[in-house]
Every structure is written in C-alpha cells, then in structure tokens.
C-alpha cells in the first residue's frame, strides 16, 4: 500500500511508511505499531544511543544502527527484527542482567521499573549466562526518606542523570568512573539531601530496573 502524502517515504519491514523530516527510525516504528525494544530511551529525553537494544538493519549499512538516534531518510529500507538482530538483542540482555542482583522487582518501585524484566521475559534471556565483575553498588545508607538508591540493579542507562538535567535542570545526579567502576552518584558522592536534589521523583519514574525506587510506596505496601 502506498502512502499518498507529500511526506518522504521509507520502507519499514517491507511496508511503505511516511515520515516527517528529522524523525528517528524508532519514532516512526512506534507510530506504526512496530515494536522495537529499548532501555536507555525515554521519549521525554534526548536520544542517547547507549544500550543498543533498539538496533535495526538498514539496507546498505554494514552494521546494525541504533534506531533511537538514526534519523530516517527517503527510500531507506529498514528491517526491525531479523534473526541476527533478535539474537543480538537477547545476548545483549543476557550481558546486562548478568550484573543485576535481581531482575523482577516490585512495580511499586516506579512506573518504568518493569521495563527490564519485561524484556528479559520477552526474549527469554538467561540471567546466569555471563558471570564476572559487577558494577554499581547500592547506597542503602542514604538517609533521605523518599528515594531508595539500589544500584546493584543499575544498568547504566543514565536515564536518571539525564532526566534530572534535561527535565528538572537540577544536575543533582551524575556518573563517576567508567567500565565496571561506573557508579551513579551525586556531587561529591554524598547523600541526596546534601545535593541539588529536590526529590521530585523524576529519576525514580524513569528508572527501567527499579534501581531507584519510591521508599514511601514500598513502605506502605
Ligand atoms: S534505546 Fe536506542 S540505544 Fe538504547
């Protein structure tokens, strides 16, 4: 079926779809009810392109590309779920969850807290496939009454850091170190109440693993 608008056209999983200049492949897929898995993506935030769960095949490009950062172009041909792509996603998920103490967490931890576990379930990803070093150490000693900082569950998607900066302009949360030493932290690595944090809860609500959680909701459950 051909889309008769004057907007440019691309081919998504064999179907012609129109798009607006500047739209990413992921945005077009979502608008057309084509599922592409994501972890570091939050529609409110600037595309970050770090988790690679959203990779797709683009005809003429050798390696898969992150659909959350790649803008569509007229005539582009995209496959969103080839066998190699799905295999890649499953392996990637297995690497991500190999570091986490637990995958299934209470939905009371936050609105997005089930995102990782739902993907693990969908891809039947093996929790114990990869063993080794772990990154992110929980900070249960943070005395604030609102936000649980359980970084053993952190996957370094930086959604908390970005929402704090981009949506709130607070810059209360940041990242220190790299690789397995990567740790979500605050300025001077202190408690949240000693930082610029206003306890707005945006970081809790964007966290896809429940690493940041609503202490009050958990207490009252
Ligand atoms: S959602 Fe695209 S790289 Fe994470």
Image (cartoon, rainbow, N blue to C red):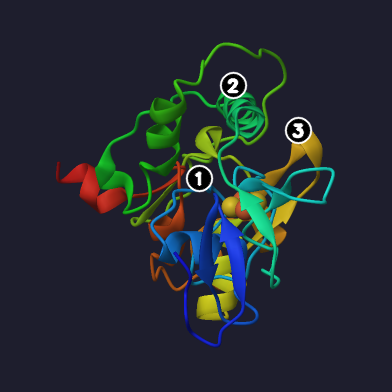
Indicate if the residue with disc 1 has its beta carbon within 8 Å of ligand 1: yes
First in residue order: circle 3 vs circle 2 = 2
The image quadrant where one finds the N terminus is bottom left
Quarter holding residue 51: top right
Q: Residue at x 40, y 33 (%)?
A: 117
The image quadrant where one finds the C terminus is top left
- How far from the left and from the top, in percent, is residue 138? 54, 36
Quarter holding residue 128: top right
Q: Residue at x 41, y 68 (%)?
A: 199
- How far from the left and from the top, in percent, is residue 146? 34, 57
Q: Choose between 28 and 170: the one closer to the eye.
A: 28
Q: Give the alpha-carbon distance from disc 3 to disc 2, as whole Å.
A: 12 Å
* In this view, 143 is above or below 120: below
First in residue order: circle 1 vs circle 2 = 1
Crowding near pointer 1: few (<14 within 10 Å), some, many (20+)?
many
Q: Give the alpha-carbon distance from disc 1 to disc 2, as whole Å.
A: 18 Å
* Residue under pointer 2: 98
Label placed on residue 37:
1
Q: Residue at x 49, y 85 (%)?
A: 5
* Residue under pointer 3: 180
Of circles 1 and 3, which is in front?
Answer: 1
- How far from the left and from the top, in percent, is residue 157? 61, 49
Q: Give the alpha-carbon distance from disc 1 to disc 3, as whole Å.
A: 24 Å
* In this view, 107 is above or below 59: above
């Amino acid at each position: 079926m051909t889309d008769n608008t004057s907007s440019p056209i691309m081919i998504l999983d064999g179907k012609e779809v129109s798009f607006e200049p500047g739209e990413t492949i992921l945005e077009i897929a979502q608008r057309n009810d084509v599922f592409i898995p994501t972890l570091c993506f939050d529609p409110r935030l600037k595309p970050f392109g770090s988790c690679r769960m959203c990779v797709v095949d683009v005809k003429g490009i050798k390696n898969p590309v992150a659909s959350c950062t790649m803008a569509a172009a007229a005539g582009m041909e995209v496959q969103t779920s080839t066998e190699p792509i799905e295999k890649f996603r499953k392996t990637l998920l297995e690497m991500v969850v190999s570091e986490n103490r637990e995958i299934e967490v209470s939905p009371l931890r936050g609105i997005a807290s089930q995102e990782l576990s739902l993907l693990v379930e969908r891809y039947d990803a093996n929790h114990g496939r990869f063993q080794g070093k772990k990154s992110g150490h929980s900070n249960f000693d943070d005395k604030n009454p609102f936000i649980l900082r359980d970084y053993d569950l952190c996957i370094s998607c930086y959604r908390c850091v970005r929402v704090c900066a981009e949506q709130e302009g607070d810059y209360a949360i940041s990242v220190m170190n790299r690789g397995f030493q990567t740790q979500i932290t605050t300025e001077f690595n202190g408690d949240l109440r000693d930082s610029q944090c206003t306890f707005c809860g945006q970081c809790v609500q964007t966290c896809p693993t429940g690493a940041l959680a609503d202490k009050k909701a958990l207490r009252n459950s």
